[in-house]
Image: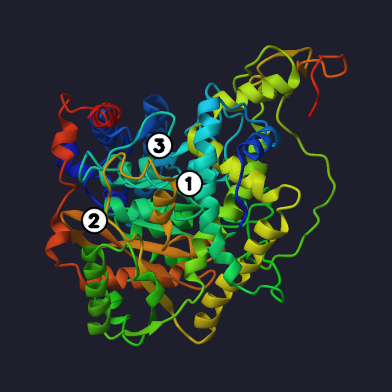
Amino acid sequence: MATLSRSEVEHVAHLARLGLTEAELGRLEGELNHILDQYAVLAQLDTEAIPPTAQTIELENILRDDTARPSLPVEAVLRNAPDSRDGFIVVPAILEGTGRSPG
Amino acid sequence: MSGATRPPEELVRLPGHAMATALHAREVSSRELTEAHLAVAERQNPALNAWLTLDRDGALAAADEADRRLAAAGSEAGAAGTAGAPGIGDLHPLFGLPVALKDLVSMAGGQCTAGSRILSGYVAPYDAHITERLRALGAVILGKTNMDEFAMGSSTEHSAFGPTANPWALGRVPGGSSGGSATAVAAYHAPFSIGTDTGGSIRQPAALTGIVGLKPTYGRVSRYGIVAFASSLDQIGPFGRDVRDAAALLHAVAGRDARDSTSAPIPVPDELLALPDDEKAAGSLRGKRLGLPREYFVAGMEPGVEARVREAVAALEAAGATVEEVSLPHTDYGLATYYIVAPAEASANLARYDGIRYGPRRGEGDTLGNYLRTRGEGFGAEVKRRIMLGTYALSAGYYDAYYLKAQKVRTLIKADFDTLFDAGFDALVAPTSPTVAFPFGARMADPVSMYLSDACTLPVNMAGLPGLSIPCGLSDGLPVGLQLIGPAWSELELFRLGRGYEAITADADWRRLEPAELVLADDPATPSPMERVAAGAAR
């Protein structure tokens, strides 16, 4: 199966939005490849005609009535926000130029 | 009002069902029981690190409320002049009794760290479904227990708050990820505790600490208010020191909840609260048809573990069960399949930890930079590994080769079990863990060696089935677990089989042994697990 190069490890870290140190990237390259080696056994199985299993209980979707119900008070929800003002969560501006590529 | 006062050390050693009997008979109060457990937990926690928080005030308030309800029920009975107090007979066996929750179960107003720094400071705004249920039936929640970060691990060493020690050997792990909940029950800090099991995180720590743990059928217990790891696998379940207690706790929390669309509208049998006595339980083993999957006795299994499991099988046969060797041919593919599916789902679930809505926010103020630092600094090494694996398995060009392939193999793994249950087997008997509790640090250097800890448990999650781990003796002085696996929704049958095994081994010498290092855990001079790990690393 595939082997992950250092630059692929960096790419995956970027996709996952994980800021990793040089030491972490180096360690992960070895560890991830060691784990990927374990996946190789799956290639022994012919699964061409096998349907995938995403969940194990046979439940059908049941729609509930669309009725208004009380939800959590805004103050209770915002108590955990790192920064909030006037009932909103404050986040960094994303519409002004930051000089960085969004990836 | 209370009869002869029993010392706390004696009270905490009662089975939960015996505590309930004493409580209902007004021989002991909920406050006395709660105080006794808090005292042991507070004294031993420096050495064991089983608890991340102990809520003394909240627990005592709940205990006093339970005592008020008991007194009211008792005086009504007196006024009516009836013998059996109406009201008391309707109480759930968990009423007034202490329970421990793994620290990924929401309790309104309390912390919920999931063992991670990325949730430090987070205060749960609402109760989980199971917290509501436990409060409603009058249980006393003592606090929140330690765990591998986001339930990823098999030793509790991946907790951001230091590992938990095993009360049988303080230099060894209790298993994981629900190691704090397992140690709390094994060390008599609580008769009941809640864990979650995604690949073995209830059954393996139950085995390694010598207690009972059940991973219920997928869909049995609502996960509303629980921190998610891998949503097609996660399930909440009970720990107890005996089968009856574990069954009572399952009864308390199981059942349909509209807020978790994966919780199933399947009735929860009240017989869970009326498991047979020893004589009847032993007799009920006669004629049971059990399968012994040969793939579960392979490489890496310790001889002492295999010996205990085979002795347990011989005891079940002697009691009239038939045990046939069977095959689950895709067992060897379980590890690879699990370590694609679970990290893939985790990478999606953990995307929410971005420092925007809750948790610490780090960085210099630009959105991407904030994400990178918040997540890079907030998650521990194992969680980062799994997020990386999952992100890779789901990424463009690899989805078919990894995730889709794993989902197809999952079909084969599930079909192995279906074939045996369709052929009429009542349950399968297997080891829970291939080894006894291992020393701190033994599997930290090689992630794959840690993953192999769950080789005998994770196929059960892949198939969505219930699995029960019960103690079956010791190897080198450390507990060994016997796993009973049944078809979907067969928890009652598994508990009855477990009761049967308890009954036929009731006189076994090992049943009289306590965790060997509890005395050491009582000593304030005993080093903490963190100090032990640091000393190990220094060697």
B520 above or below B402?
A: above
Q: Quadrant of the N terminus of chain B?
A: top left
The quadrant in which residue B246 appears is: bottom left
Of mark 2 and mark 3, the one earlier in the sequence is 3
- In the rendered structure, find residue B145 and report the number of the disc placed on it: 3
Report the amino acid beneath label 1: Leu
Report the amino acid beneath label 2: Pro
Mark 3 residue element: strand
Q: Which chain is disc 2 placed on?
A: B
> Residue A27 placed where, x, y %?
49, 35
* Co-location on one chain, circles 2 and 3: yes
> Residue A20 placed where, x, y %?
58, 27
The quadrant in which residue B284 appears is: bottom left
- In the rendered structure, find residue B137 and report the number of the disc placed on it: 1
Q: Which chain is disc 1 placed on?
A: B
Q: CA distance from mark 2 to mark 3?
A: 21 Å
- Write down the residue under mark 2: B479
User: In the picture provided, is B193 more to the left or to the right than A60?
Assistant: left
Is the C-beta separation of discs 3 and 1 under 8 Å?
Answer: no
Report the amino acid beneath label 3: Thr
Mark 2 residue element: strand
User: In the picture provided, is B364 more to the left or to the right than B19?
Assistant: right
